[in-house]
Image (cartoon, rainbow, N blue to C red):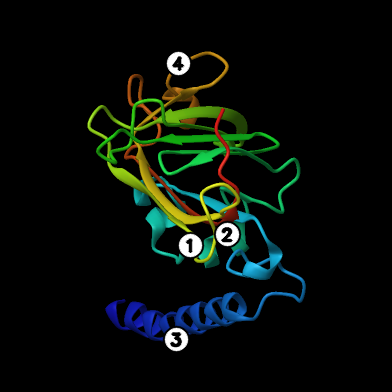
Amino acid sequence: MRKSIKTSLIIIAPALVACLVCLVWLVSRPEEPGTPIVSDTSRGASFEVNVERPRMDRFLFGILPTKIEAKLLGGELRFGDASRGARIGSVGHDRLELSADGWDLLIETDSEGRVAPGTRLVFPIEIAEKQYKLRCRPADRSVGYLRTTMRAGSGDIDGRLDGRFLVELANCVNAETGKILDTEAGGSPGQAWPSAPLTLRGSFQGLPPVRR
């Protein structure tokens, strides 16, 4: 009995390795021509926003690289200047407002550069085969930053801002009801989704400073 189990494992292990190699190869293939790239400064104003789920809330507990998971299952949480309805709102060294259809991002920082309580992200997501719109905010003791630089050779009036940001979003609720997702997301009563903070990160280039 033990010998047969050992033989089966010897046969199955190489097959699993081969499958993993194939997956990595598929994901590592170059993108199709015409895929927009945020870092292309010739495109003028551009931005990209990504939301990363905590490892425990991902497929197979996040053992697969994010790109492989996205290609296998879809449902990447991201938007950018090429997304439908993309809009650039208020932009400054202490404020960034970006949106697209279904997405609404506002990052604010205080006089010391810390992420401020007004920071929030509203976005659509599928959890347990149901569609929700979440509104997420940082914790009281926020983690993250918004870093901007004025593009070389530009002035304060006609200048353009480049930058990047990272914010941990610890508090999420259903944007329509104002309640946490627990049993709806497959958890126990009172056990809010996500199980750990979401990580919001992104970058932008050539955004015109706008105050509102």
Q: Which residue is drawn at 45% across and 82% down?
A: 17
Give the labeled residue for mark 2.
70
Q: Quadrant of residue 139?
A: top left
Pick whichever, 140 or 52, lies toward us: 140
Instruction: Give, as a three-letter code, the residue at label 3.
Output: Pro
Return the x and y of residue 42 as percentages of the image width and height. Answer: 68, 69
Instruction: Give, as a three-letter code, the residue at label 2.
Output: Ala
Return the x and y of residue 118 as percentages of the image width and height. Answer: 40, 25
Separation of residues labelled 3 and 4 (CA atoms):
47 Å
Within-10-Å neighbours for mark 1: few <14, some 14–19, many 20+:
some
Q: Is residue 132 above or below residue 93?
A: above
Q: Which of marks 3 and 2 is nearer the N terminus?
A: 3
Drawn side of residue 116 relative to residue 21, left or right: left
- Badge number at residue 196: none
Local SS, label 4: loop
Question: Do callouts 2 and 1 mark residues in contact (Cβ within 8 Å)?
Answer: yes
Q: Is residue 28 above or below residue 35?
A: below
Q: Which residue is drawn at 31% across and 76% down?
A: 1
Instruction: Give, as a three-letter code, the residue at label 1.
Output: Thr
Q: Residue at x 49, y 77 (%)?
A: 20
Q: Which of marks 2 and 4 is nearer the N terminus?
A: 2
Question: Do callouts 3 and 2 mark residues in contact (Cβ within 8 Å)?
Answer: no
- Badge number at residue 14: 3
Q: Which residue is drawn at 40% across and 32% down?
A: 193
Give the labeled residue for mark 1.
66
Instruction: Give, as a three-letter code, the residue at label 4.
Output: Lys
Separation of residues labelled 1 and 4 (CA atoms):
29 Å
Local SS, label 1: helix
Question: Do callouts 2 and 4 mark residues in contact (Cβ within 8 Å)?
Answer: no
Within-10-Å neighbours for mark 4: few <14, some 14–19, many 20+:
few
- Badge number at residue 179: 4
